Amino acid sequence: MYKQTNWSKMRTSSFAVVLFISLCLPSSSWVTADNSVYDNFLQCLYNYSQPSNSISGVIYTPSNSSYSTVSQSYIRNLRFNESTTSKPLLIITALEVSHIQIAIGCAKTHGLQMKIRSGGHDYEGVSYVSDVPFFVLDMFNLRSINVSIKDETAWVQTGATLVDNIIDALIIDVNGNLLDRASTGEDMFWAITGGGGSSFGVVLAYKINLVPVLAIVTVFRVERTLAQNATDIVHRWQEVADKLDNDIFIRMIIDVVNSGGNKTIRASFVSLFLGDTERLLSIMIAGFPELGLQKSDCHEMPWLESVLYWTGFPNGTSVDALLSRVPQVLTHLKRKSDYLKEPIPKEGLEYIFQRMMEFVTPILTFNPCGGRMAKISEFATPFPHRAGNLANIQYATNWKEDGVEAANHYINLTRMLYGYMTPFVSKFPTGLF
Ligand SMILES: *[C@@H]1O[C@H](CO)[C@@H](O)[C@H](O)[C@H]1NC(C)=O
Ligand SMILES: *[C@@H]1O[C@H](CO)[C@@H](O)[C@H](O)[C@H]1NC(C)=O
Ligand SMILES: *[C@@H]1O[C@H](CO)[C@@H](O)[C@H](O)[C@H]1NC(C)=O
Ligand SMILES: *[C@@H]1O[C@H](CO)[C@@H](O)[C@H](O)[C@H]1NC(C)=O
Ligand SMILES: *[C@@H]1O[C@H](CO)[C@@H](O)[C@H](O)[C@H]1NC(C)=O
Ligand SMILES: *[C@@H]1O[C@H](CO)[C@@H](O)[C@H](O)[C@H]1NC(C)=O
Ligand SMILES: *[C@@H]1O[C@H](CO)[C@@H](O)[C@H](O)[C@H]1NC(C)=O
Ligand SMILES: *[C@@H]1O[C@H](CO)[C@@H](O)[C@H](O)[C@H]1NC(C)=O
């Protein structure tokens, strides 16, 4: 018996797919999860503890002095780091398959909801917040990555942040069986490969295809305000970004900035190109001359350094920074998404830019589809939004203040702009929420 998954809340980007799995078990005793349910559940875990698995050593109950730290360590949205946020009855920081199997077995027997927290971002706290009594199966220790250069594949445990292009998986089902793609079958495999397989089991690891990259790639970031023809350039981006060349990706970010005391719109074009500056410039002059890209805007670097550049690390940061599991920035945040099927006309852009200057937030990020993504049919994976879309739009609002009032204010602003965008984005149904 599986709870229906609200997959529309799950998000993926072209570069990273992160799944948070919430295995929902028979619900009859959720609402009455009183002390005896908790005590029996805990006793059940201890009953299974043996020297060979020692699950007792990875259980954090609220009376444990490390409980708060463990609980808060992987909160990636401070909106869910409030005293009013629901807290898990306990946390199991699994180290091995048997810990997951015992957690599933005891959750099933005692009717407790299990939230599974993997390694990546989670905008809405779905992997560690619930409105029924629950515990967290935390996967952060399970993050080994084994790369086979020979086969051009890698096995990645789900405590790591994942990339797309999944070809196999290890999943522990509701009966505690450890299965792979061959033994679980194609339907189950399809269901857990994107867009939020929230209800099917605990995914321990994914096998992914590796894609070769050149030794040196080229990046740029170019900014244009309204006075620098941002409206025309944004309009043109919509016509060309998904069609320019398979080796180029140009993200467009639109925000409100101050220019000599007046608010204006700034469009930033951030790009990764699998090639050198010379070929990049020739593609841009032929296909997107309106941007006015200059040779001095282009920076050649190893692909790994381009990841730092994209993530916003200062120039010169060591690539070791990528090994840190502490985010650069933690804020309260709200994200929403839409899909663009047709370019927004210039008058539409002008209207939206006016609204943005009134509200200041959210920031809009446009990620183009096209290239390899345009060849993935909407039925190939549970995440259907690739072929047939020009771009994904993300609405992003960040704020510093704690509390429900601030959250409501900023969520409201985000929803208002989202509402104003409705005529311009995919509908019947909308792409995402
Ligand atoms: C734990 O094990 C004891 C002894 O075998 C048994 O009596 C008890 O019912 C078990 N408790 C739970 C919650 O499984
Ligand atoms: C907290 O729980 C962990 C994991 O079970 C355990 O290793 C540690 O000793 C506990 N700490 C305290 C103070 O009880
Ligand atoms: C989360 O909340 C706790 C308790 O208020 C606080 O100590 C901690 O610093 C907060 N975490 C972050 C990253 O702000
Ligand atoms: C990687 O290999 C090690 C050693 O064989 C193994 O313990 C680990 O589970 C493997 N990780 C993955 C993700 O396959
Ligand atoms: C803006 O576009 C106009 C008309 O195409 C052009 O004359 C002008 O030079 C452009 N301005 C900038 C800053 O690119
Ligand atoms: C700011 O706006 C005022 C009023 O429209 C205008 O007079 C002024 O030139 C603007 N300043 C800049 C730097 O654009
Ligand atoms: C980083 O700094 C070096 C040295 O100042 C410079 O040559 C290089 O172009 C800079 N890279 C980027 C991406 O700005
Ligand atoms: C946002 O707040 C305004 C003013 O309080 C209200 O009129 C509007 O309905 C709210 N919008 C949303 C989408 O909640």
Image: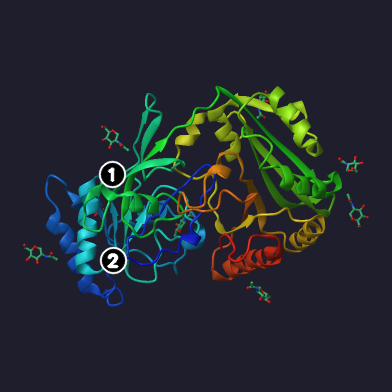
In the figure, is residue 156 to the left or right of 421? left
- Report the residue marked by disc 1: 182
- Of residue 371 and residue 433, the one placed in the foreground of this image is 371
Q: Quadrant of the N terminus?
A: bottom left
The quarter in which the C terminus is drawn is bottom right
- Residue 352 in percent (x, y) is at 76, 60
Is 283 situated left or right of 404 in this image?
Answer: right
Residue type indicated by callout 1:
Ala
Frontmost of labels 2 and 1 is 1
Q: Residues within 10 Å of mark 2 (few under 14, many from 20)?
A: many
The residue to which callout 2 is attached is: 25
Q: Is mark 1 within 8 Å of ligand 4?
A: no
Is residue 219 visible to us here? yes
Q: Nearer the viewer, residue 124 or 153?
A: 153
Query: In the image, is residue 34 above or below residue 367?
Result: below
Q: Residue at x 54, y 67 (%)?
A: 403
Element class at badge 2: loop
Ligand 1 within 8 angstroms of badge 2 C-beta: no
- Above or below residue 352? Residue 328 is above
Residue at 74 percent of width and 56 percent of height = 344
Any part of residue 66 in sight? no
Distance of label 2 from label 1 (alpha carbons):
25 Å
Mark 2: amino acid = Leu
The quarter of the picture showing ligand 7: top right
Q: Tell me residue 46's x, y (percent).
A: 15, 58
Q: Earlier in the sequence, mark 2 or mark 1?
A: 2
Residue 226 image position (x, y, % from top left): 83, 49
Residue 10: image x %, image y %?
Answer: 48, 57
